[in-house]
Image (cartoon, rainbow, N blue to C red):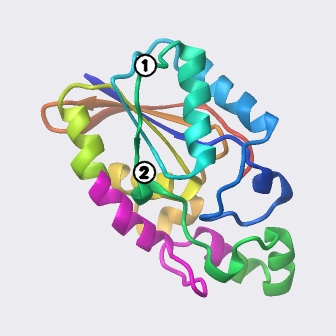
Amino acid sequence: MAYLVLVRHGQSAWNELGQWTGLTDVELTEKGRQEARAAAKALEDITFHSAHTSRLKRAQDTLSEILDELGQTELEAKKAAAINERDYGKLTGKNKWQVKEELGEEEFTKIRRSWDHPVPGGETLKDVHDRAVPYYKEHILADLRAGKNVIVSAHGNSLRALVKHIENVAPEEIPGLEIGTGEVYLYEIEPENGRIVAKEIRTTGGKA
């Protein structure tokens, strides 16, 4: 068997402020670094052979904290824009809760959690899925089928897109799929066919 670990980056400076971050490259908070180290504690029984992360610093730094804590710093990560966070377009930098007050609960939920509800100048989750899944198939799944244990440090929406693909989540069920900061999804995979045989959530993570 091979293991696939998906971990969302720890709390960032804009997570703390409740701002939509998207492709803005912001730092982890100290709490975010603590969340990354907590994720590492939940993964002490796994030796990783391959690592993937986005082009954004908060995901890269989360991965570095995890590998440092595990003593696996020799592992060099592949960095890919395909698993960057969703582009929030004109909402980038705006406070989520102020937008919720302005637009109302229904529209806010559609923007934040739905499968294909548009954002002015930005991406839907479907758009993220359409760039993240080909990368998964070509690179991450290839590693798993080679029998490698793989860790992916990325973002709430790029990971939601991957989970949708991996678990075959229906579009109408997508609003209920939320991954907290520092949260760890662990899958056991059959290398021969890439099939999931077990799933475990090892940390509950912080708020999005």
From this viewpoint, is residue 32 visible?
yes
- Quarter of the image where the N terminus is located: top left
Q: Which residues are magenta?
A: 109-135
Residue under numbered circle 2: 163
How many angstroms separate mark 2 from mark 1 (CA)? 28 Å
Considering only vertical position in the picture, is 12 above or below 147? below
Q: Secondary structure at mark 2?
A: helix
Which amino acid, mark 1?
Glu
* Side of 115 relative to 191 (left or right): right
Disc 2 + disc 1, Cβ < 8 Å = no
Q: Position of residue 126 (x, y in %)?
A: 43, 72
Q: Is disc 1 surrounded by few (<14), some (14 to 19) or many (20+) residues within 10 Å?
A: few
Q: Is disc 2 surrounded by few (<14), some (14 to 19) or many (20+) residues within 10 Å?
A: some
Which amino acid, mark 2?
Val
Q: Residue at the location (72% across, 32% down)? A: 33
Q: Position of residue 148 (x, y in %)?
A: 27, 26
Considering only vertical position in the picture, is 86 above or below 199? below
* In-front residue for pair 24/38: 24
Question: In the rendered structure, does residue 10 fall within the stretch colored magenta?
Answer: no
Q: Residue at the location (25% across, 42% down)? A: 141
Residue under numbered circle 1: 74
Q: Residue at the location (70% across, 53% down)? A: 26
